[in-house]
Amino acid sequence: MTAIGIDISELLSAALVPFALIVAGLAFLLLVVAFRSLVVPLKATLGFLLSVGATLGAVVAVFQWAGSPTWSGFPPPGR
């Protein structure tokens, strides 16, 4: 990887958590206003965060544990 690629990857990794928290927080506030309840928005926000975590976990499982799929054309990490 080039230095630019590494820098961009680190920058995006650092921005992912604050971005997800801002999106989840604003969605929670919008749902609180819309439903006038705390239970429904809380369940929706937690569901969103769990689904994002599961998606990222699946990507890690595919690319780190199973090796890089041949259809993607990417070399396996660390090789």
Image (tube, helix red, strand yellow):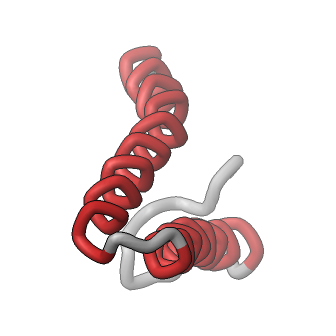
Residue 71, image quadrant: bottom left
Instruction: Determine the residue positioned at 32% across, 59% down.
Output: 27
Q: Is residue 57 visible?
A: yes
Of residues 22 and 59, which is closer to you in this image?
Answer: 22
Q: How many marks?
A: 0
Place of residue 16 in the rendered image (x, y in percent of width and height, measured from the top left): 47, 41
Q: Is residue 24 left or right of residue 66?
A: left
Q: Residue at x 43, y 73 (%)?
A: 37
The residue under the point 26% across, 59% down is 30
x and y percentages locating residue 42 in the rendered image: 54, 70
Is residue 32 left or right of 74 when viewed as pictured? left
> In the rendered image, which quarter is residue 50 located in?
bottom right
Q: Is residue 29 left or right of residue 48?
A: left
User: Where is residue 21 shown, x and y percent of the image?
Assistant: 48, 45
Q: Is residue 40 above or below residue 26?
A: below
22 versus 45 height, above or below = above
Residue at 69% over, 75% down = 61
